[in-house]
Image: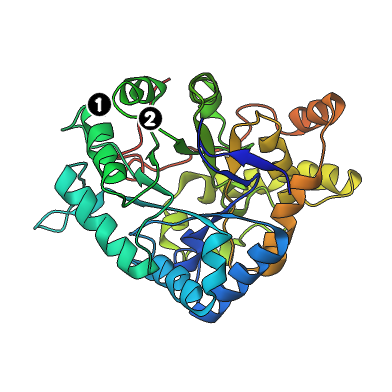
Amino acid sequence: METRRLGANGPEVSAIGYGAMSFSDLYGPTNEAESHAVLNACRDLGVTHLDTANIYGMGKSENAIGSYLKENPKARDEFIIATKATITRDPEGNRIFDNSAEHLEAELDKSLLRLGLECVDLFYAHRRDTRFTPEETAANLGRLVEKGKTRAIGLSEIAPSTLRRAMTEFPIAAVQSEYSLSTRAPELGLVQTCAELGVAMVAFAPVGRSLLTDHPIPAERIRDIPFLAGNPRFMEPNYSENIRIMESFRKLASEMGTTSAGLANAWLLSRGPHVIPIPGTRSVQHLRECISGASLSLTETDLERIEAVLPVGWAHGDRYSAQQWIGPERYC
């Protein structure tokens, strides 16, 4: 598989990585054996970048990766592993964000134990804590590089202006944001700023949380997935409209000899050599569909056809509810 660089001076990783949120139970129940099967498939397919976080299943995702690495010691040298911290709870149980040096280091230490590692390749601040300036957050993360606990640092769901300020304090290797054919806000400055500064743009939810696939999560399952049940794009009447519009994209993918997931990821790769999609799935077959996008070379005509069926702003409903929007920075 084609490789891309994780930051200006970072390691080369597969053009498409893997988002290990699916190793938690967010989109449905899973277990360690299923997660290990996906990791085996990643190795077979040449996927070298794994992305996880301390809150994915409250450590379940990291534990699954850690147990796999313990059973397959050689795999550590094959994977570039990223994790994240910041999202936590106050004494009353309210969801808050903490970018303090003490919290970030304590949470990274716990992640390293779960992963069975002495050092991760990339460590993100999962959300911006506005009590700290971007420079202060970058400095707090940078100390973890200096201590040898991570090789590089990143920021998630931030504005271009935040990235510029953070970069004055410590090199940022990657910015992670939701980015897909159904969520194109990063094109209003973030994709461009990352390219200018030599920062990898890591695109999570690249298949629109299943909307951009041949088999979207059916309506009857959504009520059992709390995150989607409260997400505007998966609530009626938006859900039915999004499914209807997507029929044209699925037809186009079939005409082009690929799957919707493969075409959606190929489109992201065409956005710039610094863009790295990280699809997540519990299914080895769906992983293969996503990764197939790395072998597609889209022409200008192909891109025009995609744009014709899914023009900017086609999706019905916001990508987050008001509650889910707490944390991500809006910049346009």
Q: Residue at x 24, y 33 (%)?
A: 139
Q: Residue 208 vs residue 88: left or right?
A: right
Write down the residue under mark 2. Answer: 171
Quarter holding the C terminus? top left
Residue 305: give its label: none
Task: Give the answer, above or below, for where 131 lies relative to 100.
Answer: above
Q: What element carries label 1?
A: helix
Tell me, yes or no, if residue 247 can be seen here.
Answer: no
In front of the other: 140 or 10: 10
Name the residue beneath numbered marker 1. Answer: 135
Disc 1 marks which amino acid?
Glu
Q: Are the residues flagged by discs 1 and 2 in contact, CB closer than 8 Å?
A: no
Marks 1 and 2, how far apart in space?
11 Å
Residue 263 at x, y = what percent? 76, 44
Residue nearest the observer in this picture, 121 or 137:
121
Q: Which of 58 and 166 is in front in this view?
A: 166
Residue at x 82% of width, y 30% of height: 305
**Looking at the image, is 93 positioned above or below residue 321?**
below
Across and down, in percent, residue 65 comes to 47, 68
Residue located 66% across and 29% down the image: 271
How many neighbours does mark 1 have within 10 angstroms: few (below 14), some (14-19), or many (20 or more)?
A: some
Q: Residue 5 appears in which quarter of the rendering?
A: top right
Q: Where is residue 199 in the image (x, y as percent from the top left)?
A: 49, 30
Local secondary structure at mark 2: loop
> Mark 2 is on which residue type?
Pro
Of badges 1 and 2, the one in the foreground is 2
Image coordinates of residue 273 in percent, x first then y, are: 65, 31
Left or right, 305 with respect to 5, comes to right
